[in-house]
Image (cartoon, grey):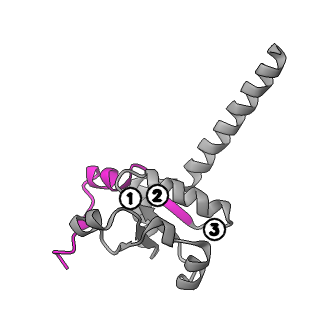
Amino acid sequence: MLALGCVGFFLLAVFNELKIKEANICGLSTTDSVKLINQNALILDVGPAEHYAQKHLLGAANKKPEDITEEGLSKNNKKNKPVLLVCDNGKVSKKLSLKLRSKGLDNIFYIKGGQTEWENASLPVSSLADQ
């Protein structure tokens, strides 16, 4: 029983480490996000529409997470640009990026810490009132 518990704990630790590594592959710092944006990345804000109206990354389009699918990205992103997902704190965009990557889309990224971290780095935001 004790040996079985140890094996279970070991497998759980390995699984957790793999999830952390996977998240670090697609999770970008604000500096790396700027570099990706400078390479003409497609920026999708997956936060609520009300937050998007108040402030969002320059050039970002607002999309509901459930509306972003593998098929939709392939159809609307014909040049296969990298896709940068952002939300308020990075949780929704992280979950969505991992989901899309599990379906074979390797050019999906998210900003660690989301728009909050973006603003903490004093990077520019826009609002619908500005446009």
How packed mark 2 is, by other alpha carbons closer than 10 Å (few <14, some 14-19, many 20 or more), is many
Q: Distance between the residues labelled 1 and 3?
A: 19 Å
Tell me residue 75's x, y (percent).
Answer: 58, 84
Residue appearing at x 68%, y 66% in the figure:
104
Residue appearing at x 20%, y 80% in the figure:
131
| Callout 2 amino acid | Ser
In the displayed structure, does residue 75 sit left or right of residue 54?
right
Q: Is mark 3 on a helix, strand or loop?
A: loop
**On the rendered image, what quadrant is the N terminus found in?**
top right
Q: Is mark 1 on a helix, strand or loop?
A: loop
| Of residues 66 and 73, the one drawn nearer to the viewer in this rendering | 66
Question: Mark 1 against mark 3, which lies toward the viewer?
Answer: 1
The answer, for residue 104, to whether it is visible in the render is yes
Tell me residue 11's x, y (percent).
Answer: 75, 32
Residue appearing at x 53%, y 54% in the figure:
95
Q: How many labels does the image show?
A: 3
Mark nearer the N terminus (2 vs 1)? 1
Q: In which quarter of the image is residue 45?
A: bottom left
What residue span does the magenta drawing correspond to?
Answer: 108-131
| Callout 1 amino acid | Cys
Question: Mark 3 against mark 2, which lies toward the viewer?
Answer: 2
Q: Name the residue under label 1.
A: 87
How packed mark 3 is, by other alpha carbons closer than 10 Å (few <14, some 14-19, many 20 or more), is some
Q: Is the Cβ of the residue at disc 2 closer than 8 Å to that at disc 1? A: yes
Q: Judge whether 121 appears above or below 73 on screen.
A: above
Query: Which residue appears farthest toward the top when viewing the image?
Result: 2
Q: Is mark 2 on a helix, strand or loop?
A: helix
Mark nearer the N terminus (3 vs 2)? 2
Dot label at residue 93: 2
Dot label at residue 105: 3
Residue appearing at x 56%, y 79% in the figure:
72
